[in-house]
Amino acid sequence: MALRNILRDTDKTLLKKSRVITDFNKRLHVLLDDMRETLAQANGLGLAAPQVGVLRRAVLVVDINDIDQDSQTLEEKVVELINPRILARSGTQSGSEGCLSLPGVYGLVTRPDLVKVAAQDRYGKPFEIWGKGLTARALCHEIDHLDGIIFTTLAERLLTEEEVDAMNAADDEEYEEDSGEGGDLIRE
């Protein structure tokens, strides 16, 4: 495995549409392993292949359900999605959103509260997952990257650092009251 450079917002690659993956080979596995290491190093909740300069439809998303309440680390909770597509959306949520490709930039973005996604694993086997809350937000954000969409184009407005801190504190309180049920990812 190797760390890959995360492209920044000035790189035009981030605005391009990614191609479907048809070869589930060693090259793909190396990309996924490198993305996993890069995501862990960056301490993020998701990473799309275009963010590391590869225009292919592959994303990693961290299942944040009960992270503080069980023995799994963030790295153990990474879900690989090849050729993901959203099948269903329900509800809405508005909240602060950031991106590893835009460090220090946050915006107020409205996303579905619940999404159903169809994807393939690293071997080409199809599966479906449901994401709720923050996990739904991360799934939508990363899938948008595959279509060249950056969250700032969807943001109602950009947020100040003070606004982000206040929103995160409120989210933490809500998460504790919810017993961690706000971000579960259910794999079918």
Image: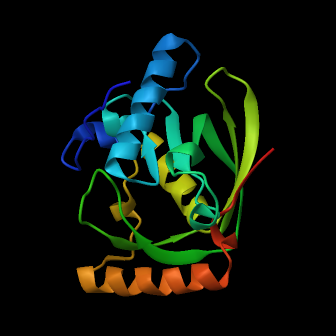
**Residue 163 placement: quadrant:** bottom left
Residue at coordinates 58% horizontally, 76% vertically from top-left? 93
Residue 101 x, y percent position in the rendering? 29, 50
**Residue 37 placement: quadrant:** top left
On the rendered structure, is 42 left or right of 145?
left
Residue at coordinates 35% horizontally, 57% vertically from top-left? 99
Residue 102 x, y percent position in the rendering? 26, 56
Residue 17 makes an appearance in the image: no
Residue at coordinates 21% horizontally, 41% vertically from top-left? 11
Residue 22 makes an appearance in the image: yes
Residue 128 x, y percent position in the rendering? 75, 42
Q: How many marks?
A: 0
On the rendered structure, is 30 left or right of 175?
left
Q: How is the image coloured?
A: rainbow
Q: Please tell me whether residue 4 is drawn above or below residue 117 in the rendered image.
A: above
Pick whichever, 158 or 172, lies toward us.
172
On the rendered structure, is 14 left or right of 135?
left
Q: Residue furthest left?
A: 10
Q: Quadrant of the C terminus?
A: top right
Q: Residue furthest front?
A: 71
Residue 126 x, y percent position in the rendering? 74, 30
**Residue 159 placement: quadrant:** bottom left
Q: Quadrant of the N terminus?
A: top left
Q: Please tell me whether residue 16 is drawn above or below residue 185 in the rendered image.
A: above
